Amino acid sequence: MQQVSAVEPFGDVDAARANVFDPDHFVEFVGRRFRAGLGMQSDDGEVRVIVGGKGAGKTIYLRRLQTGLSRNHSGYVDDWRNRPPATRHVLDVWSWSSSVRECRQRWSWLWRRAIMRSVISHLLHVKRLRARVPDGLATRLRLDFDELVPKFETRSSIVSQVEAIIQEHHDRDALDAFLHNSRWEALEHHVADALEDAPPLFFILDALDEEFEIAPSQSLDCQEGLLRQVLDLRANQRFGSRLHVMIGVRDLVYSTTQQTEHAGRFHRTPGIRALQWNREAISYFLHAKLNALDADEWMLNPRAKDPVERWLGHQIIRNKRREREEHLEDYILRHTRLIPRDVIQMGNALCAEIDIAIDSGERELSPRRIRETVARVARESGTEQLRIVANHLTADLMPREALDHGYAENYVDLPGSNVPEDVASAFQRAVFERLRQALSDLGEDRFTAKRLEKIAATIREVGDVDVLSIMWQHRLLGYVDGRHRLHDPVVFYGPDQDRSLELPEGKAHYALHPILIDAVDRLRGVGDVVTQA
């Protein structure tokens, strides 16, 4: 069997570089239990939305759809698009809105208008499509709606049109006048007429959350508006089968739709595919990666039935902190966020240690070296996740007028800003350190609700923000489901488990994710290990 890579045996963590049809790079999920999400077909034209957390694989699934659909020449598939709207534009729309509801509605119409403008540019400038549009209709699309559609010289992407619309309208009133122009209805009728004789159009938008961590709440509003329009277009009688806009969004975005009066429209919609990574799915992924390894990557015992033992030479490892033994696979996986990116990073790090051991003439990878490697990778993941939480906190503290008055950079690290990096990120660093210190003072990974409130009180000193819910949303904090069962499995955020973005109250016990023990000084594990329910 061919090795995945001479450098990275588990593959590249950057899905944009992976070969989506190479079995050594893309893990195929088969079986009924995976059918609705992880097991989706590569040419599934019914997909509109792929939902998943950071590192869940949205990019590789969208790339696979783009490639798979392109092989069917009966439809038109746009080029690969993987650029989100610039953070500054996202903040512009947010600052022009007085409430979350208003902001999401504005984004919804903004995405709708950008989609229509992009479709028109393709209909007029892609030879294969232009040949199917009657001349009179093409002329109307090109000339009759100057106030809505620019003079395109070539095809344009949806995201480019989002940014162009914002740049063309410099304040809320101008933007709203454009978005709600009465002639949009007539223009959409003409677009629908033009699509009738054209092949089905597929537009795939990826990396919409590429800069999500810079301004999470504001980016969530942006993505939620897009999600609504993508599903509305799917349900539209004239556009539904002709215009396919496929997107990947954070699970946080999907959760927002479950908290409104329209939740029924989005729940179990056929066009939504959720990448639900639980213990069963991530173990399947790990075993597939191990089976793709060359025998040279096995440390010891190639005849072992357990693939982890065949790989690392051990089936059981002693947890010295808790003075008990664990299955090595359980030990490795609970130190990840149960996402492919973490497993790939952990696998590559352990393979590097195997190379060192073999080059040194050692016959096995010692448990000490395994523990140190797992701790190092977990520490990197935990630190990254804490920084994301800190950025979320500071972004939520930013006043809406900050952008207009030139001090938004004190709260969010805007790319391309003229403010020095150390000034722009000072507040984020301060909140990060305060958060880490609060967790360090907490001291244990399992605790009562009363002790948990001390973290929130410490963070509230920098501003009124729901730090516990933000930690919950980013899967660093969970609860024990039941009363007086401190050592039971812990429930962490996930739209398949609890669709609320707020940390559930009234629980007797809470717990931190295992990756924080290595990322926070003086934080120790107590009792049973924290496992995900």
Image (spheres, rainbow, N blue to C red):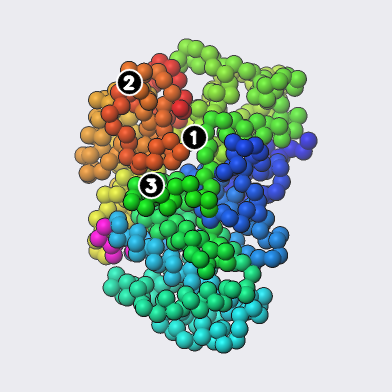
Left or right, 445 with respect to 281, comes to: left
| Range of residues picked out in magenta | 93-99
Question: Marks 2/3: CA distance?
Answer: 27 Å
Chain-order first, disc 1 or disc 3: 3
Compute the Cα span from label 1 to label 3.
24 Å
How packed mark 3 is, by other alpha carbons closer than 10 Å (few <14, some 14-19, many 20 or more), is some
- Type of the residue with mark 1: Arg
Which residue: 34% across, 26% down? Answer: 510
Label 1–label 2 contact, CB within 8 A: no
Q: Which mark is first along the chain, 3 or 2? A: 3
The location of residue 81, given as percent across then percent down, is 56, 61
- Which residue is identified by label 1? 337
Which residue is pictured at 30% across the width and 39% down the height? 467
> Which is more foreground, mark 1 or mark 3?
3
Q: CA distance from mark 1 to mark 2?
A: 25 Å
Which residue is outermost to the right?
1
Residue 407: percent from left, percent from top: 27, 59
> Of circles 1 and 2, which is in front?
2
